Amino acid sequence: MPADRGQGPTISEVAAEAGVGRATAARTLGGYGYVSPELRARVLAAAEKLGYRANALARSMSTGVSHTLGVIVADIGNPFFAGLLRGISDSARARGFDVIVLSTYENLQEEIAATNVLIDKRVDGVVVASAALDRDQVAHIRAAMDRGIPVVLVDRAVAALDLDAVVIDNREAAREAVEVLIAAGHRRIGFVWGPPVAQPPSTRRELLAAASRNLWTDGERLRGYLDALDDAHIPFDPELVMVGPKTEARVVGEVGRMLALPDRVTAVFCTETDGMTGSLRALRKAGLSYPEDVALIGFDDSAWAAVMDPPLTMIAQPVHQLGAKAAEVLLDILGGAEPARTMHTLRSQLIQRASVAPPASR
Ligand code: RIB
């Protein structure tokens, strides 16, 4: 970074150009105190001529307000978070706020570092899709709040934090999707992407215990899957639930394993985009097709899911609305509203296309 990186014209240079005292120029450019219309016009004309820009960070230090929101998400390259950020940005801009975005890849240390950056940048508030899983992982969020920076959660709740959280109806959405598969006649339904665990749980209790130690969205979607099986009196089979590190390559292996079972899966429910793409690869690798051989439903609808042939049945999250609502909740708090400390739950939508058919008679 060049040492003499130009800071642009100073208040003193604007004052000299306008032929007024520095204090008069400072009051005019800082928007405080009284300045006569004639002198104000001279200062603003001089600032325009010199290309003066107020030092926003210096102003935030003096006023304690930066009109900036900080946003922390898992992956700005993921279409889900990209849509979320657009909603946040649109709401913030409509109310005169800028946005600083940081990406953490679901890494807690990255999230802690990002939170400290936002504190240093003196943001007025933070929206975070947090990777924190329990009470000994939320000190960074409490530190921001202790500095008077309100925090709103988005996409996933964190049980250890009594904060406003803007989320969707994950459990209901998952249950509805699996019910569609069951209504089509499927009983052997694979679940792609349960909690990352050291070793595959052999019982439902172990699985739910593992889920409660992981991201809230994962656990809710798993519970919705189990709800649908229970409602249809379909026994839970741990072999049909993929757990462990979330990579597409692991999905290919795990779904391939489910397809190779003597009593193989005839349907697969995927809880995120990479789960669906991995499942499609596994089907191709096994020489199988959808929906004839295996029915598919996934989370996080997208343009590519609609143009697949046949087009995929997907759960669509209101991503822009999620982001806009999270920003509005935070901005209301910044405007003086008392935090509701509640879950603001938005409805997702199951987009039924052509990737579900009855199981082939084998
Ligand atoms: O990676 C994006 C997915 O994880 C979305 O389903 C979103 O809900 C997040 O939890």
Image (spheres, rainbow, N blue to C red):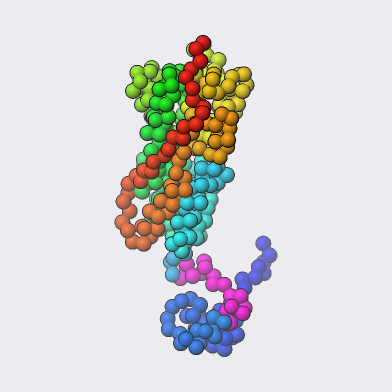
In the foreground, 2 or 342:
342
| Number of numbered discs on residues | 0
Q: Is the magenta stretch mostly helix, strand or loop?
A: helix
Task: Name the image quarter holding the N terminus.
Answer: bottom right
Q: Quadrant of residue 289?
A: top right
Q: Position of residue 97 (x, y in %)?
A: 47, 61
In the foreground, 207 or 280:
280
Q: Which residue is pictured at 60% across the width and 85% down the height?
A: 17
Q: In which quarter of the image is residue 335?
A: bottom left
Residue lying at the far right in this picture: please name it: 2
Q: Where is residue 265 in the image (x, y as percent from the top left)?
A: 49, 18
Part of the protein shown in magenta: 46-62
Residue 348 appears in the rendering: yes
Q: Position of residue 117 (x, y in %)?
A: 52, 55
State yes or no: residue 33 in magenta.
no
Residue 239 appears in the rendering: no
Q: In which quarter of the image is residue 350?
A: top left
Q: In this view, does 340 lie to the left or right of 55?
A: left
Q: Which residue is pictured at 43% across the width and 47% down the height?
A: 322
Q: Which residue is pictured at 65% across the width and 70% down the height?
A: 6
Q: Which residue is pictured at 49% across the width and 70% down the height?
A: 59
Q: Position of residue 290 (x, y in %)?
A: 55, 23
Q: Is residue 280 left or right of residue 189?
A: right
Give the vertical position of 82 relative to 173 (above or below): below
In the foreground, 339 or 80:
80
Give the vertical position of 120 relative to 9 (above or below): above
